[in-house]
Image (spheres, helix red, strand yellow):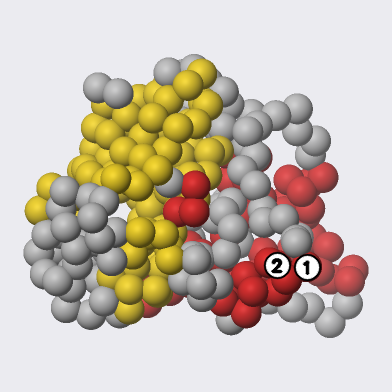
Amino acid sequence: MRGKLEAWRRSVGAKPMVANPQFNRSLWNECFVKLDPTLIKAAATSEAMRPLQAYWRKAMDDSSTGGGNALIYLEAKEAQVKATKMKYEDLPQKDTLGFWVNVEDTASWKFTAPLAGKYRVTVLQGCGKGSGGSTVAVEAGASKCEFTVEETGHFQRFVPREIGQIELTAGDNTLTIRPLQKAKSAVMDLRRVILERIDQPGPMRSAFMKQTAVKTISFTTFLPYPETE
């Protein structure tokens, strides 16, 4: 389905969703984390529904003058690739950095951060069954975090994963994805890196995500990001 949507976008020249540089996590939490509106049981009339939705309605009606949780999207197609094998695969259903079979191959992005500080790092990563376990570094200047690739069932089944934090300066930055160790035949496929400035504590995952079985559904539905697969 995602591939068909991407093919349509390209055919008509539609622009994809872009990052909100003034993303306000506090207001987003009020609308989607403190109360999940999809879990409100339907009542027979709108009058009966009104008190059940009062908190959510108030949060949705609040105005925003912008927040400090600047969002930055780093897309696979925009990466500067230094590689002998790894490359950007441009088929609509792929739209990913793939063929990552050499640990020496790297991907980098040059971008501008509106604010200095710590940024939460989320990768939209895919990995075939039995191919997980590779170790990868995310570097920005002297700042660095590492993560272990998780298998997702298919290299083009992309799952968002929070993998750490990095420090960015205001203005020009370069972020590099560098494999440290390859566990199996390939490191991973990578569609997107998402950076979110942290001005308050708290995990990216919604508070209502308590059962493992629904984590993927809830996470991909309520994140302030574009579609995941």
Q: Residue 57: x percent and y percent?
A: 79, 53
Residue for badge 1 = 12
Q: In this view, does 165 lie to the left or right of 19?
A: left
Q: In this view, does 2 lie to the left or right of 196?
A: right
| Residue at the image point whose x is 62% and y is 79% from the top | 4
- Please identify the quarter of the rendering in which residue 131 is found: bottom left
Q: Is residue 23 left or right of residue 176?
A: right
Front residue of this view, candidates 202 and 153: 153
Secondary structure of residue under mark 2: helix
Q: Say few, some or many: other residues with alpha carbon within 10 Å of mark 2 (under 14 / 14 to 19 / 20 or more).
A: some
| Residue at the image point whose x is 28% and y is 66% from the top | 99
Front residue of this view, candidates 6 and 88: 88
Q: Residue 177: x percent and y percent?
A: 29, 44
Q: Which mark is residue 80?
A: none
Residue for badge 2 = 9
Q: Residue 136: x percent and y percent?
A: 20, 49
